């Protein structure tokens, strides 16, 4: 029986740059989020312990922007969903983003390694729950019934990213690794390209507005807006 070679698997890492043209802020660009608030105050467990209301307000403002600000998936998100539909092998999108634009574009094989803006988590029973304004108003966990135990279901600095085992095994197996819209500053995501190069199997491509911190580790770097680069790349 002639062995039909399996079509290779593709891993796509995305960062805030892929959602920029949908109208959401990035972090480290001049007009980015970290130019307005300090990471220590709103994106660390210490900051949350110090002032939970301030952190809830930071994430509620981003929830409102995402759900009320006319924010829609852009051609880059749509092209990745098309890639998943049309590529005969496996396509896994690993996003650092906490928005829901990949899902709304139609991507289903998706890992939110830094959590999800539209979910909260009970610090007691650890179950992620869909966020709703009243859930925070009452701040009662519907699972365990305790009060004041719901936090954003978001991975802060110093916390362990989600589904790392699944991500690392996908990186090990893939034949193509594409990094889109990320500055390559935050680990462990910024180390994925090195892991792919060490595995010695995959081609690594970066699609970014400008070369990222780790650009030299990629076989190919294409610069420009994601909404132009990603559909052209998927073609
Ligand atoms: C961990 C929360 C242990 C949700 C975020 C010293 C050395 C190395 C590492 C560390 C160190 N000290 C501390 C660390 C660890 C730390 C870290 O990496 N710190 C950095 C700052 C040095 N990391 C952690 O703490 C992580 N946890 O390490 O645990 C561990 C590790 C492995 C296994 C087990 C245990 C947890 C990190 C998660 C933190 N949470 N977000 C939220 O509020 O959103 S991080 C935050 O940064 C967001 O998630 C964001 O996605 C992420 C990365 O940023 P980018 O997405 O890249 O966005 P950025 O603005 O930086 O760049 C945008 C890019 O897009 C730019 O390049 C721009 O040119 C481009 N662009 C703009 N417009 C467009 C575009 N591209 C295309 N088209 C456009 N139109």
Image (cartoon, grey):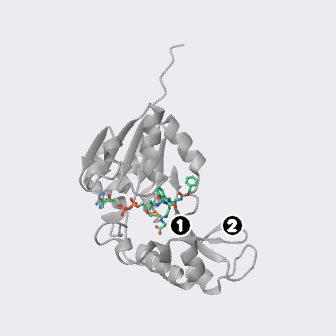
Estimate the spatial distance between the alpha carbons at disc 2 and disc 1, rounded to whole Å.
15 Å
Disc 1: CA contacts within 10 A as few (<14), some (14-19) or many (>=20): many
- Residue at position x 31%, y 49% in the image: 207
- Residue at position x 48%, y 74% in the image: 40
- Label 2, ligand 1: CB separation under 8 Å: no
Viewer-closest of 24 and 217: 217
Q: Earlier in the sequence, mark 2 or mark 1?
A: 2
| Count of marks overlaid on the render | 2
Disc 2: CA contacts within 10 A as few (<14), some (14-19) or many (>=20): some
The N terminus is located in which quarter?
Answer: top right
Note whether residue 85 is visible: no
Viewer-closest of 104 and 193: 193
- Label 1, ligand 1: CB separation under 8 Å: yes
Left or right of 55? Residue 82 is left
The residue labelled by disc 1 is 156
Note whether residue 204 is visible: yes
The residue labelled by disc 2 is 126
């Amino acid at each position: 029986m002639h062995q039909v070679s399996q079509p290779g698997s593709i891993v796509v890492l995305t960062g805030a740059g892929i959602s920029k043209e949908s109208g959401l802020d990035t972090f480290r660009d001049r007009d980015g989020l970290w130019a307005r608030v300090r990471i220590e105050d709103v994106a660390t467990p210490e900051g949350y312990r110090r002032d939970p209301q301030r952190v809830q307000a930071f994430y509620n403002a981003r929830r409102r922007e995402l759900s009320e600000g006319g924010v829609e998936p852009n051609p880059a998100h749509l092209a990745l969903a098309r890639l998943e539909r049309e590529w005969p092998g496996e396509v896994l999108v690993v996003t650092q983003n906490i928005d829901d634009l990949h899902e709304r574009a139609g991507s289903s094989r998706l890992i939110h390694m830094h959590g999800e803006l539209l979910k909260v988590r009970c610090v007691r029973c650890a179950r992620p729950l869909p966020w709703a304004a009243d859930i925070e108003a009452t701040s009662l966990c519907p699972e365990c019934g305790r009060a004041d135990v719901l936090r954003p279901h978001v991975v802060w600095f110093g916390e362990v990213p989600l589904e790392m085992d699944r991500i690392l095994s996908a990186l090990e197996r893939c034949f193509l690794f594409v990094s889109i819209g990320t500055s390559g500053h935050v680990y462990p995501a910024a180390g994925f390209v090195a892991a792919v190069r060490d595995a010695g199997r995959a081609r690594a491509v970066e699609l970014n507005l400008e070369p990222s911190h780790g650009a030299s580790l990629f076989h190919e770097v294409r610069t420009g807006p994601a909404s132009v680069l990603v559909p052209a790349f998927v073609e």
